[in-house]
Amino acid sequence: MSMTVEIDKNSGYCFGVEFAIQMAEDELNDSGNLYCLGDIVHNAMEVERLEKLGLKVISKDQLKDLKDCKVLIRAHGEPPETYELALRNNIELIDASCPVVLKLQNRVKNSWDKIKSENGQIVIYGQQGHAEVLGVAGQTNNEAIVVTTEEDLSKIDFSKPLSFYSQTTKSTAGFYKMKALIEEKIKEQEKPELLEIFDPNDSICRQVSNREPQLEKFSLEHDIIIFVSGKKSSNGKALYGVCKNTNQRSYFIENETELDRNWFRNGDKVGICGATSTPMWLMEQVAQTIETYNL
């Protein structure tokens, strides 16, 4: 009995990533040349495809040396100093910041303007050094406290007012666990008013978080799961964790060359899924390779 292979229809690019790639492709079709501040997406295969079309990935340090050119800001967004530098150097920014990220940046800036006068703190649940987190923390003059693990909570002064936000691509379970831990620490201060003014904000993108229950269902419906994602993708790591917890026969690969024929059994229902940064063409390549195992 041969295997059946199905690609999860809910996997692949989120709106923000799709929008950024479309903007890059449109500009490259017009001029054949475009700089991008950091990898446009945390997927090496897609970056390589766009580089062949003329996209040049640059770092923050390289941006300082550029003048009179066009630079794409990817979906992750950027801190205010990037826009200031572009003005000074006559750089035209093609801004593909995700609307969900821009909304978060605005909310954090407004919170910061209010809470700093109260000697309060902005806390962001996110991955230290992640492009989106840098852009959001930039709204607070980089004074926001970034927490990733329970150990990071030691950076917070719980005797002061707190506003709590999340990187848009973190897991909802992780955010609410961290929120509960913060509330416990505030209670230890024995000042009820601190808990009353604690301001937690679930700023996780629902297009991302809704994939968690969808992936759980998809993982249960298949004998084996092949999760396709770039190794740099924090969203990929989170969503792969959902698959692995639901189906122990879940495997993380970056592309079809990492497949192992020994993972598969005769008659398997194979499910292929991916992160919000995984292109559909890559999942299709993986599916085509697995289908050759039936021959």
Image: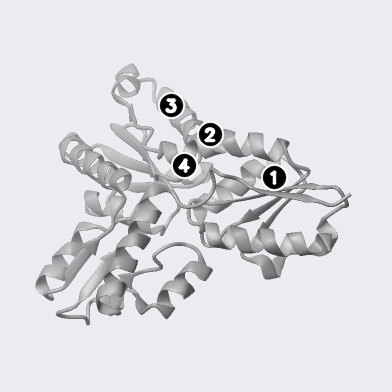
Kindly identify the amino acid type of the residue bearing the numbered disc 2.
Ala
Q: Are marks 3 and 2 in contact (CB under 8 Å)?
A: no
Q: For the residues carrying marks 3 and 4, which lies nearer the camera in this image?
A: 4
Horizontal relation, residue 292 to residue 61: left or right: right
* Left or right: residue 76 compared with residue 245: left
Mark 3 to mark 2 CA distance (whole Å)? 15 Å
Q: Amino acid at mark 3?
A: Glu
Q: Marks 3 and 4, how far apart in space?
A: 25 Å
Kindly identify which residue carries mark 3.
183
Q: Earlier in the sequence, mark 2 or mark 4?
A: 2
* Mark 4 vs mark 1: in front: 4
How far across and how far down the image is residue 111, in percent? 22, 37
Q: Earlier in the sequence, mark 3 or mark 4?
A: 3
Residue picked out by circle 1: 244
Residue type of the residue flagged with mark 1:
Lys
Residue named by callout 2: 173
Compare residues 149 and 188 and report the one nearer the observer: 149
Is disc 1 surrounded by few (<14), some (14 to 19) or many (20+) residues within 10 Å?
some
Foreground label between 2 and 1: 1
Q: Decide which of tag 2 and tag 1 comes sooner along the chain.
A: 2
Label 2 CA crowd tier, 10 Å (few <14, some 14–19, many 20+): few
For image coordinates 38% across by 33% down, the residue present is 202
Q: Farthest residue toward the top? A: 192
Say which quadrant the C terminus sits in: bottom right
Can you give x and y, in whole percent of width and height, for residue 251 in the image?
71, 54
Q: Which element carries disc 4, helix, strand or loop?
A: helix
Mark 1 and mark 3 lie on one chain; the one further toward the N terminus is 3
Whole-angstrom CA distance, mark 1 to mark 3, is 30 Å
Q: Secondary structure at mark 2?
A: helix
Q: Which residue is mark 4?
A: 208
Q: Is residue 69 above or below residue 192?
A: below
Q: Kindly report which numbered mark, 3 or 2, lies closer to the viewer in this rendering.
A: 2
